[in-house]
Amino acid sequence: MSNNKGFTAFIVDDNPSALETLAHDLSEMPEFSSVHTFQSYTEATLPLIEIQPDVLFLDVEVPGKSGLEFLDSIRPKVNFSFRVVFYTAFSDYMINAIRLSAFDYLLKPYKRSELRVIVDRLVQDSHDKGSMKRLMLDDMPHKMAMQTVSELLLVMMEEVLLFSYNSGQRSWQLCLTDRSTHLLKKGVTADDLVALHPAFVRISNTCIVNLTYLAAVENNTQRCRLCPPYDDLDLMVSRRYFSKLKEKFDLL
């Protein structure tokens, strides 16, 4: 569970009645601290990256993009682990759900007892990982080595806020989430930095951001809004890179 306070759940379903029912049932369970609802996968993508929920309840049949397509497209863009429960009225999606490593599968209309079984499994799985320190290979902490002008700096992906180009030094500069800055060794290119992780995306000739902390981009001005407490930073997406940023999310 998130911070030992309960699970954070996302529900995506274009049927308002089904969405409200599942949200109500989960909200009444003490294992859940918050439940967020969305009627499309486009609507859910940025909040998912920002909030980092523990479990996703995904309806398979949603206009615009199926739950299977959404899961396949979002996994390379996130750096946190989550569990997926597909729920739909069509049982023939079971095989695809299993292939995509869904945590569980819930058929509509479900019984409260069936939902209870899934929640109990979530709790047990969370406790097992906490007490036995079992981590999947994809969840193992991975540090990146960056050569600065003074040292070899080892950082986690989520510690990187952005990279900015220092024109005076003619080098890229690393800015961490603690607001510290580190001048990188000359010769490091923007392509080198972007290649470090899928979350690092160039937004201008002088800036590369970590998409984990990007909350929104204004359509008219291309001004970026980062997640708090970094929303005081003034960043702009250039016209050249705005279209590439749209393609990255497949939604803007």
Image (tube, rainbow, N blue to C red):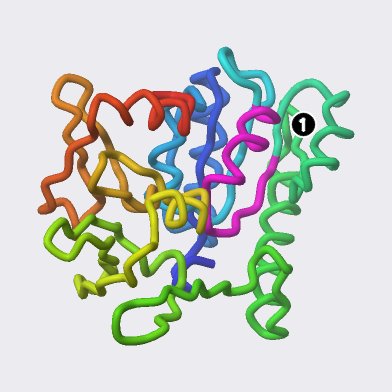
Q: Which residue is mark 1?
A: 107
x, y percent for residue 122: 68, 60
- Front-lying residue, 159 or 85: 159
Left or right: 71, with 178 as reference point: right
Residue at image position (48%, 66%) is 2
Snapshot quadrant of residue 109? top right
Rendered residue at 27%/36% (across/down): 216
Along the line of sight, which residue is nearer the eye, 179 or 99?
179
The structure residue drawn at horizontal position 75% and vertical position 45%, both measured from the top left corner, is 102
68 inside magenta stretch: yes
Work out whether residue 131 can be spotted.
yes
Viewer-closest of 51 and 176: 176
Q: Nearer the viewer, residue 96 or 184?
A: 184
Q: Secondary structure at mark 1?
A: strand
Q: Inspect this view and state whether residue 28 appears.
A: no
The crowd level at tag 1 (other Cα within 10 Å; few <14, some 14-19, many 20+) is some
Residue 222 vs 61, above or below: the answer is below
Q: Magenta part of the protein: which range?
A: 67-85
Report the quarter where the C terminus lies: top left
Which quadrant of the structure image shows residue 15? top right
Q: Quadrant of the N terminus?
A: bottom right
Identify the residue at image location x=13%, y=52%: 233
Left or right: residue 148 versus residue 16 is: left
The amino acid type of the residue labelled 1 equals Leu
